[in-house]
Image (tube, grey):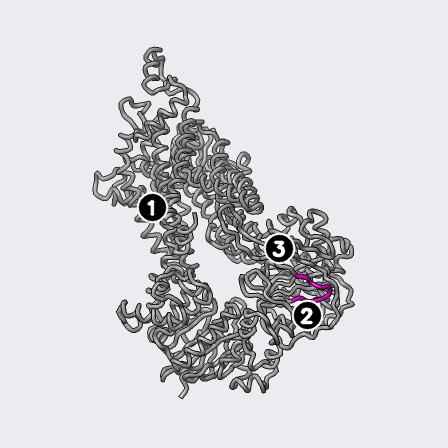
């Protein structure tokens, strides 16, 4: 018998704009000792489906319209809140996406860890504490004897997620629901957490529902995969079937959207457009304070017409390097020359002239557009500022840009909040292209987007790069994306360049330990190649 | 979630069409959006209507007041509401409605003028501190912190005692207190906005600081400022009324709602209307401003925390 | 944390000094000497009086002499009532005002806190609207209007409660405490509601629910601390406000407290009295602000840690 058997689950939300069927008649089972992955993009209903099983969706506006979910002989959907509470945290536990916000900042980690076992099993405090310490050890937290009395903010993201896992496991649940547990983590940390979860699952023989937007993440660990779109299950099957023999076009498009393959590089090498020599960018210098050395002695050439991929984890200084080149953050020492002009000395009019030639595309399309300016205002601003168009011709210029980035002309008067993430990123790209730049820094331009949208935006950037003859610095934490788009890759670690080379060289023959570690952390290598 | 990525549909739009922008779909700016939301909030609309009515009455008082301000009728004395005197008369036989209308002029004027003083000082101070940043910012905000710690209510009383009760001084004194919070709000707004990527984008486009402040910072910081301004006015009016009640604010022959309430409280046992009607006028105005402020806060989606 | 408290205390000292200095010179700058208004006083009497109050000395010497007195805890004599001094008045009035303030604060915290939490637990229901409507009334109904109205209703028409005094007749403390506390109950209710709503929407509350904890335990153990931080931070300003409110309440209910003395001194232009009381009250407010700040910082472990390590 299955551990959990969900039949015909229907959940809807009643909003001001009418009823939304978040989960529309889905059925699936979860087996003991197996990992079932639910994959879908934002708005697919994957999280709502699982939360509604435990009564964790807000009602109203949410409403479970029908179906059943049998767990150990009880239909979860029919249980009262009090009965459900006895199952939550004891038989079914949860892990959430963002470990930074999911732990109570006002309580010690130990207190939070002990809470479920004290509450559900009436275990004495002393015993609970001992148990908590053992579990912390098991999930790989060092010095649990002392760290148990620390507050969450004293832990790193990866460590907090380990605490969350320990907290979920403390009552030895039979089912664990993990909602995007690694999405907020760096790739090397992600690999560690995934391994930890797989190990624990085998050891304790629990059933896991693993919710994710990313097929690659579950490629190594999932037994069963369920693909959801707009509240419906479009396909499900075992891992091999989904990856090797997907039937539904949506599943195929998800698989196709996983960046794969190495960009083929033409042999010819052009001269350097940008030469960076011994660059240092430090922050927070004070009389007594040790500065944060974001960039340490970086020397790098960016060749005309190439796409240079800059890879690193959070805190590696990759964004700061891009911003230093564009003079968006003050540099501490070193030189940056752009087409023979030393950027570090430029001021006033000369700087403005150079700014026209280099632009930036930002990570978060929700923050990078002024919410009070329409598409027209946003795109017209650079055109008029640099006198690329006159007041009379600016309308044509704006519409041309919208055509280039694939936005319907009819949207020209709309405001950013009226667009989806992908559309906003198109506007942002349009703004960067408006000044007809030669060089663009793209800072994680696709990491905030759904996977299928991600693929579209990457293609757009490749096309426009050719059309406009751009040189690009493509900053990303995602090696697979960079390998797909970049001619050459630079690996940055703690502000220093660890290794650089063509995608092929780097992937097939990494020279440095850190690079190797990064490559091994890429999820789904085995299945995706 | 609601809007769909529809590149294929977009590409169906004929590219060579005459580019008449007027034909484009109308967008909804955040201001328009906020106004739509505000219009649905009945209490806020009610507040707005009451305020507008009271302001118009205050402006026109010298022409529409039923009696002259100094017109006494000692024979009549304090009389309850009647057909001649809708709200009754005070102990000198003066028409209460007339007094409340003239008092309202002062009360509203103090509220608006002192808030304007606070707005001008606070917004420019906060904007400069937030935009310049670094040590200047640290120093400027340290000053604000120190001033914050001063017991201003007592200081204002002291000022009134020492320099006599002077309307101009009252404006200034109240304005000087209220600008502190305004400065903090503006500064935290500017600081938060400066870190937004769209401001970085504007810098990398080559826009100068003036253009960035005017086009990118001010329009986005305006929401919280409007909300806080609306909520400052009732606070200021309350402060004036408080001082007048203690006999330290507005001085006869001028009058204000606070002063009228003070007189009313003295004689409330015999002539309760002298307390109730001025009290009603003040409370209604405060209600209106607070409802409007709350409504604006919801409509403009300003977070409720003060810093 | 101790370091933080010590540093904040150090910062408070210059603020208090500024207050003393500004107040001193403001009072001295007042037009007309304190004895000018009296009828023709014989020159030698005036000189004797001025000598007694040290008015014959240069102003800088007066200032330092005053500081010296303050350091010894002497807040100065009264101009108007020879023989009485500020210390005497404070020791007479402070206990009364402190008691009134404490009751009012209790009213505010209990009524306001409960109303705010209740409202936040069931937002947009009657349980939210009803207490919040009362809170709105409380905010728009200034103390000096609420006091007389309460007196009118409960004292004069219903004759349930005494209308004046403090500790003379049983029940005469109820109306003043309610009057003074009402506005702050309203503020605290609104702040508490906003704070609790904010916290209840946090991810870690969802974590607590996923643990299967009952709702009351989630509210008490997980939400209350974070939700009440804005309320605690408000206690500093609230204290200053309560003190100012006590001027009004003590005047309305004829309570022999500090506030009433202060207002009387202001009316009589009893300059040394105002000076002394202002310095005393200001110091009190500054210290209480400090206390609220420290409490709010202490409640937040993250802030506590930062304060511990930074300079």
Query: Residue under circle 3?
Result: B200
The answer to whether marks 3 and 1 mark residues whose Cβ atoms lie closer than 8 Å is: no
Position of A255 compared to C26: left or right?
Answer: right
Pointers 2 and 3 in contact (C-beta within 8 Å): no
Task: Locate residue C307, reporting x and y percent.
Answer: 41, 50
Q: Mark 2 lies on which chain?
A: A
- Give the chain of mark 3: B
- Viewer-nearest residue: B276 or B300: B300
Mark nearer the viewer, 3 or 1: 3
Q: Please rate how many residues cluster around mark 1, counting C-alpha atoms within 10 Å: few if below 14, some from 14 to 19, many from 20.
A: many
- State which quarter of the image contains the N terminus of chain B: bottom right
Residue A523: quadrant of the picture: bottom right
The disc at residue A487 is: 2
The label nearer to you, 2 versus 1, is: 2
Do marks 2 and 3 both belong to one polypeptide chain? no
In the image, A318 versus C215, the foreground residue is A318
Any part of residue A476 in sight: yes
The residues tagged by marks 3 and 1 sit, at their Cα atoms, a distance apart of 48 Å
Q: Residues within 10 Å of mark 3 (few under 14, many from 20)?
A: many
Could you tell whether C122 is left or right of C85 in the image?
right
Magenta region includes residue A163: no
Gap in Å between the C-alphas at discs 2 and 3? 27 Å
**A121 lies above or below C222:** below
Q: What element carries label 1?
A: helix
C131 to the left or right of B134: left
Is residue A303 within the magenta segment? yes
User: Is the magenta region chiefly helix, strand or loop?
Assistant: strand
- For disc 1, the marked residue is C181
Distance between the alpha carbons at the discs numbered 2 and 1: 70 Å
Question: Dot 2, how many residues are within 10 Å of its Cα: few (below 14), some (14-19), or many (20+)?
Answer: many
Say which chain tag 1 marks.
C
Total tally of numbered discs in the picture? 3
């Amino acid at each position: 018998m299955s551990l959990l058997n969900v039949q015909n689950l229907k959940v809807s939300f009643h909003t001001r704009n009418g009823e939304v069927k978040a989960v529309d008649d889905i059925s699936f089972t979860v087996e003991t000792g197996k990992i079932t992955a639910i994959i879908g993009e934002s708005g697919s209903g994957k999280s709502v489906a699982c939360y509604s099983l435990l009564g964790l969706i807000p009602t109203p506006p949410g409403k479970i319209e029908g179906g059943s979910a049998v767990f150990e002989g009880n239909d979860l959907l029919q249980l009262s809140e009090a009965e459900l509470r006895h199952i939550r945290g004891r038989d079914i536990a949860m892990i959430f996406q963002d470990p930074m916000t999911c732990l109570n900042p006002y309580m010690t980690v130990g207190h939070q860890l002990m809470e479920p076992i004290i509450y559900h099993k009436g275990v004495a405090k002393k015993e609970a504490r001992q148990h908590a310490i053992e579990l912390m050890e098991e999930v790989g937290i060092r010095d649990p004897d002392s760290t148990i009395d620390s507050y969450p903010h004293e832990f790193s993201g990866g460590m907090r997620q380990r605490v969350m896992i320990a907290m979920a496991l403390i009552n030895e649940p039979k089912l664990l629901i993990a909602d995007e547990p690694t999405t907020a983590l760096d790739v090397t940390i992600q690999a560690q957490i995934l391994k930890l979860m797989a190990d624990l699952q085998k050891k304790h023989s629990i059933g896991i529902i693993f919710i994710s937007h990313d097929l690659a993440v579950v490629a190594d660990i999932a037994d069963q995969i369920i693909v959801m779109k707009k509240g419906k299950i479009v396909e499900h099957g075992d891992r091999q079937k989904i990856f090797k023999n997907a039937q539904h076009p949506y599943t195929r498009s998800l698989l196709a959207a996983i960046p794969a393959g190495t960009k083929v590089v033409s042999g010819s090498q052009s001269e350097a457009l940008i030469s960076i020599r011994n660059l240092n960018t430090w922050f927070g210098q004070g009389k007594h304070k040790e500065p944060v050395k974001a960039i340490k002695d970086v020397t790098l050439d960016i060749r005309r017409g190439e796409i240079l991929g800059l890879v690193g984890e959070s805190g590696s200084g990759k964004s700061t390097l891009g911003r230093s080149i564009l003079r968006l953050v003050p540099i501490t020492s070193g030189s940056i020359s752009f087409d023979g002009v030393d950027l570090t000395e430029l001021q006033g009019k000369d700087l403005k002239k150079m700014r026209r030639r280099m632009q930036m595309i930002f990570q978060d399309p929700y923050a990078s557009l002024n919410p009070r300016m329409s598409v027209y205002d946003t795109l017209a601003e650079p055109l008029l500022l640099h006198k690329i168009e006159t007041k009379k011709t600016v309308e044509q210029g704006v519409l041309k840009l919208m055509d280039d980035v694939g936005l319907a002309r009819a949207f020209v008067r709309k405001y950013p909040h009226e667009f989806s993430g992908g559309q906003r990123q198109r506007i942002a790209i349009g703004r960067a292209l408006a000044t007809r730049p030669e060089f663009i820094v793209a800072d994680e331009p696709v990491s905030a987007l759904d996977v299928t949208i991600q693929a579209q935006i990457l293609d757009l950037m490749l096309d426009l790069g050719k059309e406009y003859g751009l040189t690009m610095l493509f900053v990303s934490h995602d090696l697979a994306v960079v390998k797909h788009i970049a001619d050459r890759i630079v690996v940055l670690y703690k502000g220093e360049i660890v290794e650089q080379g063509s995608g092929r060289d780097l992937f097939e023959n990494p020279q440095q330990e850190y690079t190797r570690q990064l490559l091994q952390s890429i999820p789904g290598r085995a299945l995706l190649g | 979630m609601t809007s769909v990525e529809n590149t294929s549909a977009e590409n169906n739009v004929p590219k060579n069409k005459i580019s008449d922008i007027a034909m484009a779909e109308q967008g909804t700016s955040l201001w328009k959006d906020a106004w739509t939301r505000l219009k649905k909030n009945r209490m806020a609309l009610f507040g707005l209507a009451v305020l507008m009515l009271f302001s118009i009455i205050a402006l026109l008082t010298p022409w529409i007041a039923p009696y002259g301000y100094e017109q006494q009728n000692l024979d009549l004395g304090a009389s309850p509401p009647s057909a001649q005197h809708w709200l009754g008369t005070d102990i000198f036989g003066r028409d209460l409605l007339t007094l409340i209308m003239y008092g309202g002029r002062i009360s509203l004027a103090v509220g608006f003028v002192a808030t304007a003083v606070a707005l001008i000082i606070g917004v420019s101070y906060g904007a400069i501190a937030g935009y310049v940043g670094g040590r200047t910012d640290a120093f400027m905000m340290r000053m604000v912190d120190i001033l914050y710690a001063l017991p201003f209510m007592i200081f204002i009383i002291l000022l009134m005692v020492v320099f006599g009760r002077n309307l101009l001084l009252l404006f200034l004194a109240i304005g000087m207190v209220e600008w502190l919070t305004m400065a903090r709000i503006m500064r935290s707004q500017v600081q938060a906005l400066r870190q937004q990527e769209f401001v970085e984008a504007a810098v990398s486009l080559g826009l100068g600081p003036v253009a960035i402040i005017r086009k990118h910072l001010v329009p986005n910081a305006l929401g919280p400022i409007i909300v806080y301004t609306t909520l400052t006015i009732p606070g200021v009016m309350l402060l004036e009324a408080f001082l007048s009640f203690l006999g330290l604010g507005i001085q006869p022959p001028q009058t204000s709602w606070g002063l009228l309430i003070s007189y009313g409280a003295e004689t409330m046992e015999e002539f309760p209307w002298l307390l109730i009607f001025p009290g009603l006028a003040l409370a209604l105005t405060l209600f209106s401003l607070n409802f409007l402020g709350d409504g604006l806060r919801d409509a403009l989606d300003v977070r409720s925390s003060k810093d | 944390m101790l370091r933080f408290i010590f540093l904040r205390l150090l910062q408070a000292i210059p603020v208090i000094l500024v207050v003393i200095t500004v107040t001193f010179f403001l009072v001295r700058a007042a037009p007309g000497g304190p004895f000018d208004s009296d009828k023709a006083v014989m020159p030698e009497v005036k000189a004797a009086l001025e000598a007694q109050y040290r008015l014959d000395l240069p102003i800088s010497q007066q200032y330092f002499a005053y500081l010296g007195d303050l350091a010894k805890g002497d807040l100065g004599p009264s101009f108007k009532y020879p023989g009485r001094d500020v210390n005497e008045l404070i020791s007479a009035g402070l206990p009364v005002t402190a008691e009134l303030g404490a009751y009012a604060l209790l009213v505010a915290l209990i009524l306001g806190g409960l109303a705010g939490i209740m409202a936040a637990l069931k937002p947009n229901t009657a349980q939210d609207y009803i207490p919040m409507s009362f809170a709105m009334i409380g905010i728009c109904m200034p103390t000096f209007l609420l006091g007389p109205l309460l007196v009118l209703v409960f004292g004069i028409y219903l004759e349930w409660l005494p209308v004046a005094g403090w500790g003379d007749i049983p029940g005469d403390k109820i109306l003043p405490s309610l009057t003074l506390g009402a506005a702050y109950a309203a503020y605290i209710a609104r702040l508490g509601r906003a704070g609790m709503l904010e916290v209840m929407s946090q991810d870690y509350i969802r974590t607590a629910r996923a643990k299967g904890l009952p709702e009351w335990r989630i509210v008490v153990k997980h939400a209350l601390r974070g939700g009440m931080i804005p309320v605690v931070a408000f206690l500093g300003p609230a204290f200053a406000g309560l003190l100012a409110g006590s001027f009004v309440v003590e005047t309305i209910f004829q309570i022999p407290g500090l506030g009433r003395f202060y207002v009387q001194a202001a009316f009589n232009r009893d300059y040394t009295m105002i000076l002394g009381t202002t310095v005393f009250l200001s110091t009190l407010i500054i210290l209480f602000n400090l206390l609220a700040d420290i409490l709010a910082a202490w409640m937040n472990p993250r802030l506590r840690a930062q304060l511990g390590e930074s300079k």
